[in-house]
Image (tube, rainbow, N blue to C red):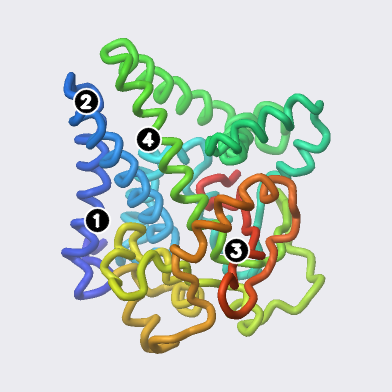
Amino acid sequence: MTTNTLYKDGFWPNTLAIFYAVAGYAAGVALLTASSYAANAFGVVLLTHSLVIAAYLIHEFAHLTMFRSNRLNNGFGVLMSWLTGACYASFDNLKRKHIRHHADRADVITFDYRKFLRERPAWVRKLVFALEWLYIPAVELIMHGFVIALPFFSAHHKSHRLHVLGVLVVRVGLFAALAWYAPRAAVLYTVSYLLFLTVLRFMDAFQHTYVAYPILEGRMPDIERRDKEYEYKNTYSNLISVGHPWLNLLTLNFAYHNAHHAKPSVVWHRLPELHRDLYGEHDPQVLPARELLRTFNRNRMARILDDDYGEVTEGPGRTDRFIGAVGVSFLTAV
C-alpha cells in the first residue's frame, strides 16, 4: 500500500489542508476555553472554518482524490466525519450517497423533511420557521437528527444502533466535559457548529437546480433524461470571488462546481485550472457569491417548504428568482 498522494503536485496542498482541519479544530476549541473574549472570538472563527475545510475534505476523500490508497482515503474520511459530526452514519454511506448524486444527476435526499413538517402539528412548523428566521439552520439539524434516530425506528437499519449509541456516548461525553470545564466554551462551540452548517447550506443552496428525490434504498426513478447537458445547465459555480481566485480556497475550491461535475476525479487544488480550461473567463453558470447573498437571505423562509428551487434568469438581478435548495448536505446520509 502506498501513502503517496494521487497527484504528484498534491503532497503539500493535501498535507496542509488535512493539518489545517485537524490542528485548527484543536486550536479553535482551546481558544474557546480561554478567559480572553478576543481569543474566544478568534476561536469561533478558526473552529468554524476548520469544520468547513474538514467537511470539504470528506467530499475529496469520498471521491478518492487525495491518496492512491482507498484505505487511506476512507480512514481520513472517517476522521473528518468525526470532527464534523457526520460520524453517526458510516463513511461508506456518505460516499455512496454522494456518488449517487453524480451518477443519477439528482439531489438524493435520505429524508423528506418537507413531508415530515407538513404532517407535524402547526406549532412544530412555526418553531422551525422561527428558528430559520433567526438564521438558525433548523432544517439541517432535523436532517442530522434523522440520521441519529433512523436505526431506532427502522428495522432495516437496526444493525446501526450500537454504532450510533457508541458515537453518542463519546460525543455527548466530550461535550459534557467541555461544558463542565468551561461552560462558555460549550456555548461558543455550539455557535461555531451552527455557523459551520450555515456556510455549508449557503454553498449547497445554489449549486444545482436538480430534481430532488427523497429515497432511502433502491434506484432513482427514470422519469426524465438526465444527460451531461442537463447536468451542466442545472449546475452552478457559486464562486466566492471571480477576480481573486485564492479566496475560493476558503471552501477548498468547492465552488468550482461545474468543473467538479465535469471531472469528479480531479482533486480540489486543480479545479481552478480545470475551470479555466473548460469554460474560460466567462461562463453563464458562474454565480458569484455576492449575487447570491441577497436571495439567500430574502428566500430563506420560502426555501423551507418550497419544492421548486427557482431559476436563474439573465441580466441584473438574475439570481433573485433562484430560491435554492435546503437539506441536501452530503453530510447527512444513512
Circle 3 sits in a helix, a strand or a loop, which is it? helix
CA–CA distance in space, label 2 to label 1: 27 Å
Circle 2 sits in a helix, a strand or a loop, which is it? helix
Q: Position of residue 33 (x, y in %)?
A: 23, 22
Q: Position of residue 210 (x, y in %)?
A: 66, 67
Name the residue located 22 percent from the left edge and 61 percent from the top edge: 3
Tell me the amino acid under the disc marked 2.
Answer: Tyr
Tell me whether circle 2 and circle 1 mark residues in contact (CB < 8 Å): no
Report the residue marked by disc 4.
192
Height in image: 301 above or below 154? below
Report the residue marked by disc 1.
17
Q: Residue furthest top?
A: 180
Name which of mark 4 and mark 2 comes first in the sequence: 2
Q: Which mark, by number, is residue 105?
A: none
Q: Between tags 4 and 1, which lies in front?
A: 4
Name which of mark 2 and mark 1 comes first in the sequence: 1
